Image (cartoon, grey):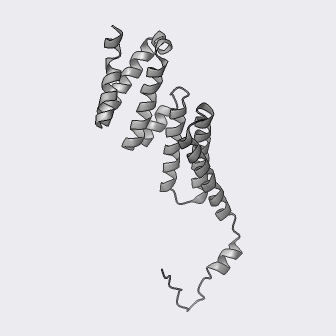
């Protein structure tokens, strides 16, 4: 009876391994729904329940469904994988922004998510690396923002009226 009830989970794993991400995602959603309908099942099989949620985040990220991932993260249980994939998504979002202040804001949110992932899974080196890398990038962007305009004028002088603009080389 239990094996029949958990069949969608095993099918989802098989689909994921075969690279059928959409099919696997739907099966993991079905598994999560089953666990949500019978709360005792979450206590009996917590690893399977949490793995089905973590796998959904991996799939959403891999498919590039970032809006769906962020929406799901607001209602998901507190799991290291949820925070890790949410942090990756927030980090990725900075690539579409031009303003350093906006980039810093998104990166700080990503950093917070990576820190939560580390707190929940202290041995996760991917989360640690992403956390350190994100904070280094934040520091660089803040440093860049704090460069006084006079220095920028010296480094990149504007051509005077009537002068030919400098040509960039290289």
Q: Is residue 4 left or right of residue 64?
A: left
Q: Is residue 85 left or right of residue 7?
A: right
- Residue 6: x percent and y percent? 35, 16
Viewer can see residue 22: no
Q: Residue at x 47, y 24 (%)?
A: 50
Say if 83 sits above or below 36 in the image: below
Q: Residue at x 28, y 35 (%)?
A: 18
Say if 51 sits above or below 94 in the image: above
Q: Which residue is the extreme one toward the bottom? A: 162
- Residue 133: x percent and y percent? 58, 51
Q: Quadrant of residue 156?
A: bottom right
Q: Residue at x 66, y 56 (%)?
A: 139
Q: Residue at x 63, y 54 (%)?
A: 136
Q: Nearer the viewer, residue 122 or 73?
A: 122
Q: Which residue is the extreme one toward the top? A: 1
Q: Quadrant of the N terminus?
A: top left
- Residue 142: x percent and y percent? 66, 59
- Residue 59: x percent and y percent? 39, 37
Q: Nearer the viewer, residue 2 or 60?
A: 2
Q: Nearer the viewer, residue 86 or 118?
A: 118
């Amino acid at each position: 009876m239990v094996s029949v009830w958990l069949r969608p989970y095993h099918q989802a794993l098989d689909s994921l391994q075969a690279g059928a991400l959409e099919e696997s995602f739907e099966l993991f959603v079905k598994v999560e729904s089953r666990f949500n309908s019978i709360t005792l099942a979450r206590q009996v099989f917590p690893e399977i329940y949490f793995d089905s949620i973590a796998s959904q985040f991996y799939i959403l990220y891999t498919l590039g469904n970032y809006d769906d991932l962020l929406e799901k993260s607001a209602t998901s249980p507190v799991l290291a994988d949820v925070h890790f994939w949410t942090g990756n998504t927030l980090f990725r979002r900075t690539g579409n922004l031009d303003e350093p202040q906006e980039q810093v804001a998104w990166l700080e949110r990503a950093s917070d998510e990576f820190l939560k992932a580390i707190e929940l899974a202290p041995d996760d080196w991917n989360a640690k690396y992403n956390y350190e890398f994100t904070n280094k990038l934040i520091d660089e962007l803040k440093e860049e923002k704090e460069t006084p305009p006079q220095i920028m004028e010296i480094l990149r002088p504007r051509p005077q009226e009537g002068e030919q603009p400098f040509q960039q080389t290289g």
